[in-house]
Amino acid sequence: MESQEFKKILKRFSENKLTEAEKLNLEKWYAAYDAEEFTGFRDEAHASRIKAEMFAAIAPAQAQKVLRLPNWRKRLPYAAAAVLLIAVGLLFKPAGIGEQTVDLPVYLAYTTSAAESKKITLADGSIVHLNPSSEFKVTQDFGKQASRTVFLEKGNAFFEVAKDPEHPFLVHSGLLITKVLGTKFKVSNYTDQKGELAIEVSLSEGKVEVATPQKVLAQLMPGEKINYNLRTNTWKQDDFGLAENNQWYATAIDLNQGSFEEVARIVKLYYGVTLSSEDPNVDRYQYNIQMRSTHTLSQTLKIICSIHHKKYRRTGNGIIIY
């Protein structure tokens, strides 16, 4: 069905003026569309983010005039068809249908390359320390809505949130939503050593609530963190050293008896490469080391290997310790 033709039919449907032939035409189109599998999302986290953005755009309009459709139970398939069009990017502005239209939000995007960090001050005075190899975005009208909503697409960010009890601060990172009023915390949206997509929230000050769109997972207190595995939909709540969070947005990170996994995560953060090992003993090693984003990758690898007298070799976009 052509786009212009469908717009006309949808307008007539909203006015309850569809002929029987037009109803049949719309039903055939919807049945054919429903039979195809939509594969536009990269993964479940991507789908969740798109859903969150759609609701962020729609929410301001909900308090205003709503178009009421007569006999809605009989017309549910048509309404579903219209929603489906929005989801796949065929949204148009039906100026002739009702009086309220919804404009999709405009975003300000921030990215950092390997070994690059950024300090971002938001309109409300909140500060975001964006770590290397990270992607972050915020709506252009941030601070003008009921909630202050931001998106950490990937990487790591440390947040210093300005207190404003009337406007909750929401961080969307994959499937997780972190809700705060005024606090300091870190969010990581990353791939762990096993190649699993994971999201971690750790709290330095204040109180946060961590949830999925379906349920609340935990309310964290200072010194607590939660790690969520996107593949298995499982999570673990744990304690951590408070000094650890403050180091994450610094150019130098001091590890005291740090694990190889922590070392590998920092290497991934600073240089965008995956660090692994063929030696099973490496997983049991501990590292007392200062890692600086100002060092080159070669300098950092030499320091890491010197601690336990190891060597390294490159393979594709990875480094293997042996």
Image (cartoon, rainbow, N blue to C red):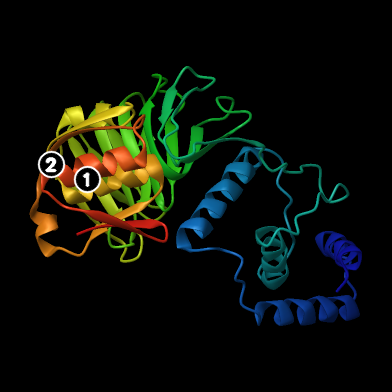
Residue closest to the eye, 18 or 5: 5
- Residue sitting nearer the eye, 320 or 81: 320
Residue 171 locus on image (x, y percent): 43, 38
Q: Residue at x 67, y 65 (%)?
A: 84
* Amino acid tagged 2: Tyr
- Residue 259 in the image: state x and y as whole percent: 15, 47
Q: Is residue 3 above or below residue 104?
A: below
Residue 193, placed above or below residue 297: below
In this view of the protein, which residue sits in the foreground, 211 or 321?
321
Gap in angstroms between the C-alphas marked 2 and 1: 9 Å
Residue 74 seen in render: no
Q: Is residue 155 visible?
A: yes
- Name the element at disc 1: helix
Vertical relation: 251 (above or below) 196 = above
Residue depicted at x 50% and y 35%: 149
Q: Quadrant of residue 314?
A: bottom left
Q: Which residue is mark 2?
A: 287
Q: In this figure, which residue is indicated by the disc labeled 1? A: 262
Q: Secondary structure at mark 2?
A: strand
Residue at 63% over, 45% down: 58
Residue 13 relative to residue 278: left or right: right
The residue drawn where x is 72% and y is 43% is 102
Residue count near mark 1 (Cα–Cα under 10 Å), binned few <14, some 14–19, many ≥20? some
Residue in front for this viewpoint, 254 or 47:
254
**Quick check: marks 2 and 1 in contact, CB under 8 Å?**
yes
Q: Report the amino acid beneath label 1.
A: Glu
Q: Nearer the viewer, mark 2 or mark 1?
A: 2
